[in-house]
Amino acid sequence: MGDLRSRASYLQRDNRKYGDMKDRILLSVKCVRKEAKEWFENSCAPHEHKMMASAWYHVTYHPSYFKQDMFYFSFPWIVHDVLLNIKAMNSKRREAEKNL
């Protein structure tokens, strides 16, 4: 499902068709990412972006929701900039707590 690990499994002997298909898929993925990012930005106020990104991450990777046999990067990584900001803030907070 949505996994292009091996072109041979899709088009064994036709490299040109594979290249065309790959380009169409990459364009489609880019459009989906753009649409999801716009949805994210328009679904909540800017001061709520960290909470929304955290919720996306939680429901994607928390053991209560996550299937161990299916590991893929998913929608939370569309907002990777927000997630990395959260991680940096949490790291600084933990470091400050250690120094108390």
Image (cartoon, helix red, strand yellow):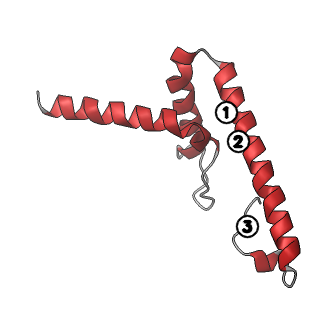
Whether residue 68 is situated above or below residue 5 in the rendered picture:
above
Query: Contact, CB < 8 Å: mark 1 with mark 2?
Result: yes
Q: Amino acid at mark 1?
A: Lys
Q: Nearer the viewer, residue 61 or 26?
A: 26
Question: Would you name the residue on which mark 2 appears?
Answer: 33
Residue sitting at 70 percent across and 41 percent down?
33
- Relative to residue 2, is residue 11 drawn left or right? right
Q: Amino acid at mark 2?
A: Arg
Residue 1 location in percent, x, y? 77, 60
Where the C terminus falls, by quadrant? Answer: top left
Q: Which mark is residue 37?
A: 1
Q: Amino acid at mark 3?
A: Leu
Residue sitting at 53 percent across and 40 percent down?
80
- Mark earlier in primary sequence (2, 3): 3
Q: Please, what secondary structure does the residue beneath circle 3 have?
A: loop
The CA span between labels 1 and 2 is 6 Å
Residue 12 location in percent, x, y? 84, 83
How many residues crowd mark 3 within 10 Å: few (<14), some (14–19), many (20+)? few
The CA span between labels 3 and 1 is 23 Å
Q: Which mark is residue 4?
A: 3
Residue sitting at 69 percent across and 70 percent down?
5
Residue 71 location in percent, x, y? 59, 58
Residue sitting at 59 percent across and 35 percent down?
56
Whether residue 77 is situated above or below residue 43 in the rendered picture:
below
How many residues crowd mark 1 within 10 Å: few (<14), some (14–19), many (20+)? some
Residue 96 location in percent, x, y? 19, 29
How many residues crowd mark 2 within 10 Å: few (<14), some (14–19), many (20+)? some
